[in-house]
Structures are given as structure tokens and as C-alpha cells.
Amino acid sequence: MIALLADLLQKAAPDEIAPLVYLMQGRLAPEYRQKEFGINEKSSLKAVAQAAGCAVEEAQRLFAEKGDAGLVAQDCLSRQPQMRLAEQACHRHVVAEVDRAH
């Protein structure tokens, strides 16, 4: 895992490093700037399902099995063609959109 993260950071542009490190820590920003999003479990699973292109019912089933929305996202996304993921999975876009929404 450490080697993967180190490789990711080595390949990142200088302006990408801070957002990537925050994401690795499960944050979108420094702790002093952290915001509460108030997203409940049901809404977060709907968002995971929509982003991953799987049915909400499937995401809920996987959550009941795995108990972790991150693992549900990983499982659902692993079923998607790589090109589709590349179109959606830009961390800059994700951070900007979440920050803009709150």
C-alpha cells in the first residue's frame, strides 16, 4: 500500500499533492477547515450507486454484507470498464464539487 501511495504522489503534479494527501486521510481539506456534510447512510449509498453505475439495491446489499460504504464503492467500481472510470474519477473534480456544494 505504501508503495502504491508513494508512486501516486511521485506522479502527481505539485498542485495535486495536497488534495491527494487530504483524500488519503479521509478529508477534503485541512482539519481546521473541515466541514460536516450531514449525509446519512442511505443518501451516501445512493451516491455511491449512481457514481459506480450500479443499482441502489445492489449497493445496499453489499453494504449489509461488507458494512463499509468505501468497500461498496470499490466493489461496484471494480465492475466498470476502465475508460468509464477515467472519465469520472478525477480527484480535482470530486474535491471541487463537494467543496462547492458545501
Image: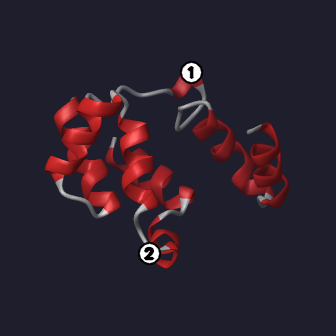
Left/right placement of residue 95 relative to residue 20 reads left
Q: Classify the position of the C terminus by image quarter.
A: top left
- Mark sitting earlier along the chain (1/2): 1
Give 15 or 71, whichever is nearer the viewer. Answer: 71
Left/right placement of residue 77 relative to residue 63 reads right
- Element on which disc 1 rests: helix
Name the residue that disc number 1 marks: 32
Expressed as whole percent of the image width and height from the top left, the position of residue 24 reads 63, 37
- Element on which disc 2 rests: helix
In the rendered image of this protein, does residue 38 appear above or below residue 97?
above
Q: Is residue 39 visible?
A: no
Farthest residue in the front direction?
Answer: 65
- What is the crowding at mark 2: few (fewer than 14 residues within 10 Å), some, or many (at least 20)? few
| Contact flag, marks 1 and 2 (Cβ < 8 Å) | no
Left/right placement of residue 33 relative to residue 40 reads right
Expressed as whole percent of the image width and height from the top left, the position of residue 90 reads 54, 63
Expressed as whole percent of the image width and height from the top left, the position of residue 38 reads 26, 28
Q: Classify the position of the N terminus by image quarter.
A: top right
In the rendered image of this protein, does residue 59 appear above or below residue 25?
below
Give 90 or 3, whichever is nearer the viewer. Answer: 3
Expressed as whole percent of the image width and height from the top left, the position of residue 68 reads 37, 30
Camera-side mark, 1 or 2: 2
Quarter location, residue 72 = top left
Residue found at x 46% / y 55%: 94
Q: Is residue 73 visible?
A: yes
Q: Which mark is residue 10?
A: none
Residue found at x 39% / y 47%: 73
Residue found at x 24% / y 46%: 59
Name the residue that disc number 2 marks: 84
Q: What type is the residue that disc 1 sits on? A: Tyr
